[in-house]
Image (spheres, rainbow, N blue to C red):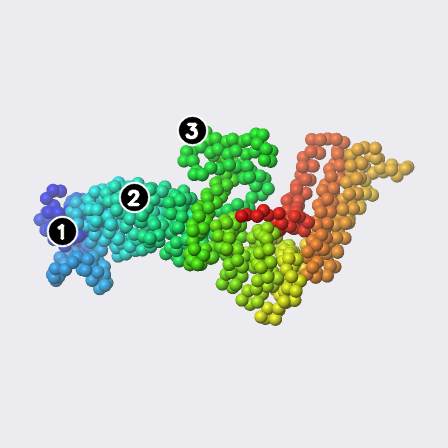
Amino acid sequence: MAANTVPELLDGLNYANWSVCMKNYLLANDLWDIVEATTEAPSPEEAEAEYKAWIKKNAAALHAIQISCMSHILSQIKEIGSARICWDSLAKMHEVQSPGDQIQPQEVELPPVKEELQQQAAVNQGTEGHVYVQFRPLHKAIESGDLNAVRDFLHFHPNAVNKKLTDSGRTALHLATLTGKLKMVEELVELLSEEDLQVLDNNHETALMLAAGVGATRIAECMIKKNSKLVAVPGKDDLPVIVACNNGHKDTARYLYSITPFELLLPENGKYGSLLLHVSIFNEMFDISLDLLRRCPHLSTTRNHLGTTPLIELSGLCDLFPSGLRFVFWKRWIYSGIKVQLPAAQHSDVRITIPQNDHKHHGSIVIRALGPLRRLGSNLLQFFGLKQIYDTKLTHAYALEILHWMSEDISTIDDTKLGQSGVFDAFFRAIQYGIIEVVIEMLKANPNLLTVLNTNRRGILQSAVQHRQEKIFSLIYVLDTRKYMLISGIDEWKNNILHIAATLAPPDRLAHISGAVLQMQRELQWYKEVESIVNPLSKEYTNIFNERPSQIFSNTHKQLVSDGEKWMKETATSCTVVGALIITIMFTAAFTVPGGNVQDTGFPIFLQRKSFMLFIISDAISLFASSTSVLMFLGVLTSRYAEDDFIKSLPTKLIIGLSTLFISIAAMMVAFCATLIIMLKGEMKLVIPITLLASIPVTLFILLQFPLLVEIFVSTYGPGIFDRKMKYWY
């Protein structure tokens, strides 16, 4: 019965013919009454014989329908147990309203026109079903990864292999590529011609573009093996290698780059090379970036589809350069000792060398990950943070090498074309972000950049002051007589450099400094530093708004002064309460000593014990330190809070107050532990755990507040934010 049920299996496109044949088959075998029945099945309790007959006929009709469907259709109806429901479900799936409507009205025969025009007309008329519904089974089979269903569909409809299956214009190869099913893609590629592989969807993307976007390297290899020209077929603004690079798929990007004709990436052949260099730097694929620059340095100043150049974008990436390092001191020490070599090694071993004693290489720590120890070595590196430090150093080395090759290009550009090439934009962008390495390399490549002005007629020093980039400003200390020309310049609003220093710093620069007090202190340090190098007459110079520098400083820093005063008073109030409590406790403890006093003489009973002397000394230190702390914080509360007070007066009082408070808390805990030793008569099993518990509040307080104390001290009495010993770079 299975072989002769209907002439052809139901595949989703032949329902009209299939339903007629199937109905006739069911009529001939006395099964149609089960399908068209409008009443429920007989109850087994009331008519057992009739029920068994109905079950048998229903199973026969259902079996006939099921074996007459292709696998992708059967998968949708296999759970249905009623022949009538199964028939109605198939009718509904194929947009038939009732069992009597299976035979579709004949369509008007269209004149012979191109199939693509017919599809477009169908879309324009809103008749998507006439174009794409017929391919829906194939679409679903691809999405579900059902390779057998795809094979069945293409066996009966071989022409569908290169048709656009969706309204986005994607073919079966596009859809299969997105699923990542290599076997399915391989079979489709075998059925397609080289031209079919180059078909673009509505987003102007080939299937190779999609493979690059999802990082499917093996799928890309399969397509390129059939058609090597695919790698050069562009999309809207990019190539497959650019898509892979932009999506962070390193292996795919390197493979596509290795087979992309380099001539296609040259500036004279378009902007693809510049865009690839741009995205490879952003996604830290530095091996591609370096190879591009070594073969064509001019790509660094070639504008791409984004309207920018790789040099401009590199000039804003602080984290790629050593000047943007944010490591703590011990990580900086390790960083300074690590050696890297370019190009990076391709093997899996990791070797890190760290000097044991400053710059003297008396010994080294060498960590290797070899064979079965590879995982252990990697975990060890991550545990100590060495892998992160090594990767950072390697990134910096790559960035400096890339910058070197870009500078080679800058040195060859005529001065009249520097602005057009984006060199000026890159120079001032590097100043804005404080990337001293970029600024110095560009000055080495073309010293004339030292005197260029931006759109607001501000030069290198004015821009450095505006953006509060002390590393850039420190270049002034190594300049010769040219520095006076740079200092004396005025911008389009007739602001001199002191006017610019008087304005409030950008929010992103203030955000790096803790607390309004330190922010105000940093602003005053900038103003005083610039004031010390300008002509004294500059202090009285007015701009086009008739404002002197001192007036601008007071007006723009009012809120910061107010915030600083509020912060100082809140901090002083909180610390005063803590200090007063410690004074009360320590003063009381001095007259209620542990163990009591001798009744006849009044001397402490444990006077001769060393632990008692420790108690008395620590009690006294805590009392005196807390008293000093309270007095200092009272001084903070009663200060006048003038602008100049934020430079040293207020920070000094805060330093003394916090330092003595730390000492008083630590001494109080020592006195407590000494008392325990006395009272417990040397029972160390009890003394040691209690002492460790007593150290917890001291440790927490120091961890939370000590960094602030260090920051205030360094900011007030440290070497300063400006590097007066900078070496001349040229």
Comparing labels 3 and 1, the label whose residue is closer to the camera = 3
Q: Position of residue 651 (x, y in %)?
A: 69, 53
Q: Are marks 2 and 1 in contact (CB under 8 Å)?
A: no
N-term-proximal mark, 2 vs 1:
1
Residue receiving disc 1: 18
The residue tagged with tag 2: helix, strand or loop? helix
Q: CA distance from mark 3 to mark 1?
A: 63 Å
Q: Residue at x 13, y 42 (%)?
A: 2
Q: Residue at x 43, y 53 (%)?
A: 413
- Crowding around mark 2 (Cα neighbors within 10 Å: few <14, some 14 to 19, many 20+) is many
**Is 638 above or below relative to 48?**
below
Could you say which quadrant of the image residue 355 lies in? top right
- Label count reads 3
Residue receiving disc 3: 371
Identify residue type, mark 1: Trp
Pick the residue in front: 670 or 680. 670
Q: Residue furthest front?
A: 481
Pick the residue in front: 618 or 200. 200
Identify residue type, mark 3: Gly
- Crowding around mark 1 (Cα neighbors within 10 Å: few <14, some 14 to 19, many 20+) is many
The residue tagged with tag 1: helix, strand or loop? helix
Q: For the N terminus, give its image quadrant.
A: top left
Q: Residue at x 50, y 34 (%)?
A: 352
Image-based side of 90 in relation to 497, left or right: left
Q: Are marks 2 and 3 in contact (CB under 8 Å)?
A: no
**Is 675 above or below relative to 574?**
above
Image-based side of 310 in relation to 683, left or right: left
Q: Which mark is residue 321?
A: none
Q: Which mark is residue 220?
A: 2
Q: Position of residue 75 (x, y in %)?
A: 24, 46
